[in-house]
Amino acid sequence: MAGRAGRAHNPEEAARRVRLLLLDVDGVLTDGGLYVLPGGGEAVRFDVRDGLGLVRARQEGLAVGFVSGRSTDAVRARAAELGVEEVHLGVKDKATVLAAILSRRGLTPEEVCYVGDDLPDIPVLEAVGLPVTVPEAPDEVVDAAAYVTRHPGGRGAVREVVDFVLRARSGASEGA
């Protein structure tokens, strides 16, 4: 579904240009909850459907990256398991990381889909071609998005975005 701000572009058209899928982690790949373990460690829950979607995205030629304000061993392990190419954890300024990724990969902002769920994600959402959020995001984040997933973060939202982008890209190649 479209964001409330009614971005100037059509999400389907924007999805056709996507070459890089960047994701926040907490609240997007997870439900935002943390399990504090005895001894002070943390655990998080990832949805296997999201993981399969990311594997499929990579198989279809999309680059995948994680950009998170937090840094945990669980996220590093999940990224390695899925073969995620860009892993940026403990990030304070996500827009600066986006600029570095674009420069290194020779991409334009229009070729990026970013999925974020909270206020620190807004600068990146405002910069990319396909800004996406989850339904439980604050109003300001929803307003910055062109697409709001039906599935919540950590419960299939990423798979939904991957399927949306791949369908759009497939339609673009059929019509060309």
Image (cartoon, grey):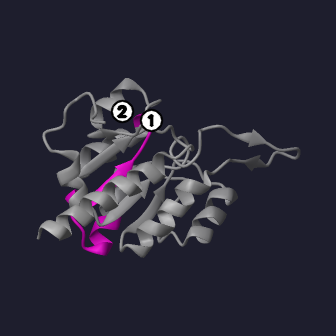
The residue that label 2 is drawn on is: 141
| Type of the residue with mark 1 | Asp
CB-based contact (under 8 Å), mark 2 and mark 1? yes
Residue 109 visible (yes or no): no
Sequence-wise, the earlier of marks 2 and 1 is 1
For the record, the magenta segment spans 100-119
Residue 89 is inside the magenta segment: no
111 lies left or right of 54: left
Q: Is residue 111 magenta?
A: yes
Give the SS element for disc 2. Answer: helix
Place of residue 74 in the rendered image (x, y in percent of width and height, measured from the top left): 68, 57
**Residue occupying image coordinates x 59% and y 45%:** 30
Q: Residue 129's x, y, as percent? A: 23, 52
Q: Quadrant of the N terminus?
A: top left
In terms of secondary structure, where does tag 1 sit? Answer: loop
Residue 76 appears left or right of 166 = right
Q: Position of residue 21 (x, y in %)?
A: 38, 60
Q: Residue 63 or 38: which is nearer the viewer?
A: 63
Q: Which mark is residue 118?
A: 1
